[in-house]
Image: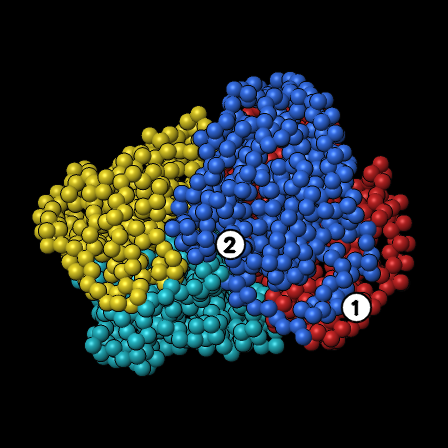
Chain colours: A cyan, B yellow, C red, D blue
Amino acid sequence: MSFNTFGHIFRVTTWGESHGPALGCTVDGVPPGIALTEADIQPWLDRRKPGQNKFTTQRQEADQVRILSGVFEGMTTGTPIQLMIENTDQRSKDYGDIAQAFRPGHADITYHQKYGHRDYRGGGRSSARETAARVAAGGVARAVLARLAPAVRISGFMVQMGAKGIDRTRFDETQIDQNPFWCPDATAAIEWAGYLDELRLSHNSVGAVIEVTATGVPAGLGAPLYAKLDSDLASGMMSINAVKAVEIGDGMGVAALTGVDNADEIRMGPDGPEFLSNHAGGILGGISTGQPVICRFAVKPTSSILTPRRTIDTTGAERDLITKGRHDPCVGIRAVPVGEAMMACTLLDHLLLDRGHTGGLRGKIG
Amino acid sequence: MSFNTFGHIFRVTTWGESHGPALGCTVDGVPPGIALTEADIQPWLDRRKPGQNKFTTQRQEADQVRILSGVFEGMTTGTPIQLMIENTDQRSKDYGDIAQAFRPGHADITYHQKYGHRDYRGGGRSSARETAARVAAGGVARAVLARLAPAVRISGFMVQMGAKGIDRTRFDETQIDQNPFWCPDATAAIEWAGYLDELRLSHNSVGAVIEVTATGVPAGLGAPLYAKLDSDLASGMMSINAVKAVEIGDGMGVAALTGVDNADEIRMGPDGPEFLSNHAGGILGGISTGQPVICRFAVKPTSSILTPRRTIDTTGAERDLITKGRHDPCVGIRAVPVGEAMMACTLLDHLLLDRGHTGGLRGKIG
Amino acid sequence: MSFNTFGHIFRVTTWGESHGPALGCTVDGVPPGIALTEADIQPWLDRRKPGQNKFTTQRQEADQVRILSGVFEGMTTGTPIQLMIENTDQRSKDYGDIAQAFRPGHADITYHQKYGHRDYRGGGRSSARETAARVAAGGVARAVLARLAPAVRISGFMVQMGAKGIDRTRFDETQIDQNPFWCPDATAAIEWAGYLDELRLSHNSVGAVIEVTATGVPAGLGAPLYAKLDSDLASGMMSINAVKAVEIGDGMGVAALTGVDNADEIRMGPDGPEFLSNHAGGILGGISTGQPVICRFAVKPTSSILTPRRTIDTTGAERDLITKGRHDPCVGIRAVPVGEAMMACTLLDHLLLDRGHTGGLRGKIG
Amino acid sequence: MSFNTFGHIFRVTTWGESHGPALGCTVDGVPPGIALTEADIQPWLDRRKPGQNKFTTQRQEADQVRILSGVFEGMTTGTPIQLMIENTDQRSKDYGDIAQAFRPGHADITYHQKYGHRDYRGGGRSSARETAARVAAGGVARAVLARLAPAVRISGFMVQMGAKGIDRTRFDETQIDQNPFWCPDATAAIEWAGYLDELRLSHNSVGAVIEVTATGVPAGLGAPLYAKLDSDLASGMMSINAVKAVEIGDGMGVAALTGVDNADEIRMGPDGPEFLSNHAGGILGGISTGQPVICRFAVKPTSSILTPRRTIDTTGAERDLITKGRHDPCVGIRAVPVGEAMMACTLLDHLLLDRGHTGGLRGKIG
């Protein structure tokens, strides 16, 4: 990964600022001959789109994606695919008062220190709006996966909001799309709604934990030692705005396990090896085992809040700042489709890398 | 990062297997004119060296590093530095019985599935022995940092073993080198010693959490969006053997915070901006703030234990396997110097990348 | 370089097809704080623009560039700059008859074999139209060079058309912009005009040699061994459509020289070392010497001609094909600004890489 | 390509100086399951080895390669292969007098200017001795090609020494190994021997042109636009010491051709398309056509000669310098196996890249 590009063979280069005329990405390394139209990408963008309920920013963006290259007569050509999304509802005036002052928790101060000159409007390049480009790229990745690894299923959902986690015994996949939080536990979703309403009205915000799983992933993906499947997922998820931690499988919880408990014992099933547990989150030695790949990440609370916080401006003057604008009280909500997109892109990238390097070889067992 | 190389400008390519004749790395992108001898690197290797007490593997390796290129008359020349460490105490016979059987929790099964043919002796390429090369590279990085960013101080230590965390009120940096666990809390170290002894005798092992901090890091390091300082740290730490989670700053804990609490408010100090807290772990928008960079990672319990675990072999036959050999009951201990090395390499890499890209520009405040 | 991206720090990713809605590029790694508007880029595109005289394709493209990101209030921000050029005069019907047949000398057959599915209209991705994106990126590179290395002057011109070379004794830089061929020899330009007219009317085309020089290049640019300044120039120039050879300095001519003649002897001048000749073309060991960097490349004759040539189609049927459409009789003409752009991008990239790696160190002489 | 690494998937990182203890390379991205021992690599090194006759340097190096990793029980494991060659005959005293003075035509002055501090012994890193590592890597590439693309045959030979080219009508492949020049024209070889003897005795040297061809290359290799097969070959060959030009197919000669003459017309043969000529050198649009890939490069005369040349030293003092030591009067001779190695590495790299990206898809014809 380098600057604004991620991936090894399936390489995504994103561009654009929150309040510029448009944003988008170049998706390179897409295999040829894959059916692809804007209609394959748009639904994923719609999932991420702001303004869908009172718990996400009220900015109204159509987030309409256009394919400008790389597809001919509805099929990929193997050449770079340019995806563009025009910004239509930038209210730059909302941001005028933070041109000089640094919003605490935001990248304003670090961009200023690193670059000297920055687009302060809506956070410019550091805005979570950039993730629309990732989601679009994820749509391309999914279309390719559907062809090359059709068993792969990717699912993202929220497992914790604030201190309140879901009850895993109530996990119901069909609930995920039924509430504004992508929550698989209907009871928790109701609690969260009340909690978040309260926070919003008290000019506050809260963090969350997102889980993204992938089933049907073939064994053998991941390029040790420095493009391990888990190190690439860690890099990808950590690069999402406001993410401060990434876990694979049992994650931080492995510290408390003993070797006896942590062992994912193996038995032989009808179709090959079967693991009796999945503490490893589907990855051993940086390579997929064939079990579900399980990745979680923590998203910090939205830093833009209406409660005044102490800060300084570029002159060094101290001020108390509230951040007006249209913000998500729990930015973790909209991180769900972004996490799914990063998972899709990473899995496809490793599928292509593996077929290049090993020829997709699979050592026999039995 | 790609396959066996990490870094953008300061690029480290490692090679070697646990039981081959030698292992090492090529360190490319080192600035010229930096004083460097083997004596600058050896102490870091000695910190990581096995066999130093009863809590680490009893394998006896001198881990003597040789510089084969890139240094002339005690000074770097800007050309690639080859570091080689010969393996001297490989007892391959210990591993003969696992040539075909897959040790649960190890990469045996995934290497088999991905590559078909693998060096099973001691885990071959997937062995933690590879981390000696990282530590050697870290020694080079530290020598360069000492010249280019002399204020940087990197410190790694263990903050949790099993379920038992340190008491932060007892944090004493001088204790870190005084116990076998790199533990900054003398009381916890004593408890851990008893606990680990017990585990060892009962043929078990345990996980741990390591923290690596860096102070004196200049503001402005990190290349958003896909070579953010935190995403590179996440990738680097996750690539260490047995690591299952990476946290920056408050890490997974941010989920439970509200925006009001999480805000790292800013005031103006005599030398520039001062933050009133550091939930962000010294990184905002992927760029260093100048505060301490704080990174934690969880290491799973050693998978090689003397308690039998169920598994299969390459023929698909089911077996119960104990893993003989000389293993660490808490592999997290020896991960401490490795985490420090990854921190040193990543910081230096970003220092060089930043002076290339922005010229090391720092936007003025005040 | 990988797929559709070139450069190490200053990285350009191009996208777009000849007859798609638009083409463009993402220019990443641009230092912040550089004054840049579309007006800095447009003049270079205008130089390359088709339809300017009877010797270039009559396709009428405004080639109007738009900056979509990375610039704020007229200054670069260090974030990726997206440049887009809309295609306005695609006459796809001209190309209908070559949907299945492979034009000899074109990439039609290789794209078919590699990708299976391709955009045949105007050559799709393999069209020289892609070079508009490079020229736009070159405009950005020049703006940065003007700030960071203001002494650099880049000049491209044609030194041979068909078998007819220029007379170096008549070299007059001011002539370059005075004729349709960027020819520094006014007499040769007149001859070429007649010759090319003749070829055009006889439905033929011809090759050319282009020279691109850069003066004022600081010593020390180039990253041996595999990102040497000359190997990067070779890669960059060879990647231009229809280029079949690249020379540095005396190029192929060095074969005929003896060591005594080839030596660029050195004397001490008032401002440092002075070379008494420049057979090396300003590059020794892959690193710039401070002398003029001299690069030449040969462009093959336009393959699209109205004279029938034997070929086959995708069914394997044999046909005689003439290539209708609006083509340059000497495609080398429009390669001049493209070569200049590749020179500008490569020099800037190495300037940034060098200041990252060595800190722009220059060993003292005298 | 970046610094000391070339390749995309098959990545070679070289290290080592002329007079250091050893040199070598890490070969990453090698597919697993390929039979490989030192005996597969050594013959290629023996071809390049110095001191084999009076026309190459009299330095005596065994150039014995050791495989230190990545191979287990005679078969590759997919992990990085470390190849090491010890330097045994460094006579550093020969170079003492050039510690401060810059040999004209060498990289002494540019390394000094770029790096400040350099290993002057025998040119240090800039010595052609580094090419031993490339040849070793080429041996690995050939072993893999033998398995994955067994039809590929690579052949390098000298086609011009000084102003004297071979007579293509006397081209006889079996002659190549029969003379010290890898010359396919027995008559020319005799002439060259006399000519070179004369030059050597008069303390002079001369340049050469090398041609490397590859037959049996499958159609479809090459990743346009910036990892074209020809741009990667150009980069690879130009990175060889003393190379100043690279040609594909007709090379510089295409300038003098008309479109009618240059067209490689196509007819249908029993096994697919057949080209009636090969001006393109087997590459169209950066992608292999299935025809022989033809690449030529010009090597400048050895700069180290016993005839005094004017130069300066690091103090700026002017001197007349002769370069003692053991030098090749025509360094082009030993560039032949190096060119072959770069061809082998590049072809394999693109084979792997293509099977990753397109899955090795070949669009049907007929």
Residue at the disc numbered 2 = D144
Position of B75 with respect to C3 (left or right) is left
Quarter of the image for the N terminus of chain A: give it. Answer: bottom left
- Give whichever of C28, C234 is nearer the camera: C234
- Would you say residue B222 is visible in this rendering? no
Q: Position of residue B220 (x, y in %)?
A: 41, 46
Q: Judge by depth and name the residue closer to the eye, A44 or D216.
A: D216
Q: Chain of mark 1?
A: C
SS type, badge 2: helix
Amino acid type at image mark 2: Val
Please, what secondary structure does the residue beneath circle 1 have? Answer: strand
Q: Which mark, residue A127? A: none
Report, in whole angstroms, how far the alpha carbon at label 1 lies from the one at label 2: 37 Å
Q: Which mark is residue C310?
A: 1
Instruction: Report which quarter residue D111 is drawn in.
Output: top right
**Above or below, comparing residue B42 to residue A283 in the picture:** above
Residue A190 located left or right of residue C138: left
